[in-house]
Image (cartoon, coloured by chain):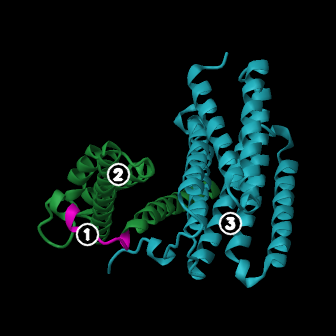
Amino acid sequence: MIPSLICVGSVAVFFQWIAAYCRSILASSRRVELSDRVREVAGFRGDSVTVADFGRLLQLVRLCPERGDDHSDIRAVGAYYRALRVMNRLTSSIVPRIAAWANRECENCSYFAAVALDRRISYSRDLFTQQLGSRA
Amino acid sequence: MVSPLYTVIYVLGLILEAAVVVCVCMRRNYLAYLPVGFYMLCSAVTTIGSYFCIRQFGWGAVYRYYYYYSDATMTVLLFWVVIHFYQKALAQLQVSKYIRVGTAVLISLTALFSYVVISKNREHLTGRFVIELSQNLYFEGVVLTYVLWCVILKLKETRAQLAQLVLALGIYFAGIAVAYAIRNLFAGFADSILAWVPPIMSTWLAVAWIYTLAHVSEDTILITSQLEARVPA
């Protein structure tokens, strides 16, 4: 009886804390305004970044030179996004409220990827400027 | 004979634990994270000890004694880290005296509970008992961390570093508590994949703490209420 209660209770808080940990990483990008440059590069039509943009944004992030300090964040958010997509598919017909929450979280992941892309574009531009400066 | 996979996982764990100690030492205010560094240092020493124990005595009863009892001791040591996080979270309320008293009561109760369980299980102190003891200790860690997380949310704590350190610790405690509870429920699982959960979770804790100590500055602010996973109505 006690091991069953421990198991259920621990599983519940385990997933709650994993979600909170990933949200703490996502929170760093929430207050960042996306530049026009990244909107142009990523080809956003409207104001918001959609769930479907995540994969494309991540591909663009990988094309840019690495900054060195965002690699672990991107991997963690990527894993969180994949888990949310699975949850969304599993719950969409059974518990639509959870599916809607997972979808909203996926949008936050996409926004995080857009901010990461923006930072990497800025970084590569800085590198380019530095190279031009050293040649002159 | 120590298997190559075991060696790789434990060497990786050892490197990561040493890296946490280095991260703590490199901080300007290293005293603020002294319990974190001390725990990881002791954990690294225990890892080295387990390697020599296997080389000397193999995977038999001696290693099992060493593993479970050093694990229980390390878990109690980790409670010191949790208490330290409590003191950081409640620093403004100036209740460190009460936290110290609470810690003493908690450790005494844990010792008393363990003594009662041991006295009733003298016939089979190894086997199921150590698994049950470890399960209870880890679950106590889950409860302590959950209360701490509730305190952080209630006090609207804004330090991202503290929040991430606590969350990483909570994931560690909960992951291992689940593994021990399943092993306790289904004895056949003992030698299965669940045996790999503790080293994997130890690696997770070290990686998460390195990330937080190296990447998240103390000035980074976080709105912790946003971290709660609220399902829309």
CA gap between label 3 and label 2 equals 30 Å
Magenta stretch, residue numbers: A30-38
Q: Which chain is cyan?
A: B
Q: Which chain is green?
A: A
Q: Amino acid at mark 1?
A: Pro
Marks 2 and 1 in Cβ contact (< 8 Å): no
- Identified at 60% across, 60% down, the residue is B165
Q: Is residue A35 magenta?
A: yes
CA gap between label 2 and label 1 equals 23 Å
The residue wearing badge 3 is: B144
Q: Residues within 10 Å of mark 3 (few under 14, many from 20)?
A: some
Instruction: Say which mark, if any, is on residue A78.
Output: 2
Camera-nearest residue between B130 and A111? A111
Report whether B97 appears left or right of A25: right
Report whether A89 appears left or right of B11: left
The residue wearing badge 1 is: A96
Residue B60 seen in this snapshot: no
Residue projecting furthest to the front: A136
Q: Amino acid at mark 2?
A: Gly
Discs 2 and 1 lie in a common subunit: yes
Of tags 3 and 1, the one toward the viewer is: 3
Q: Secondary structure at mark 3?
A: helix
Instruction: Say which mark, if any, is on residue B143.
Output: none
Placement of the C terminus of chain B among the 4 image quadrants: bottom left
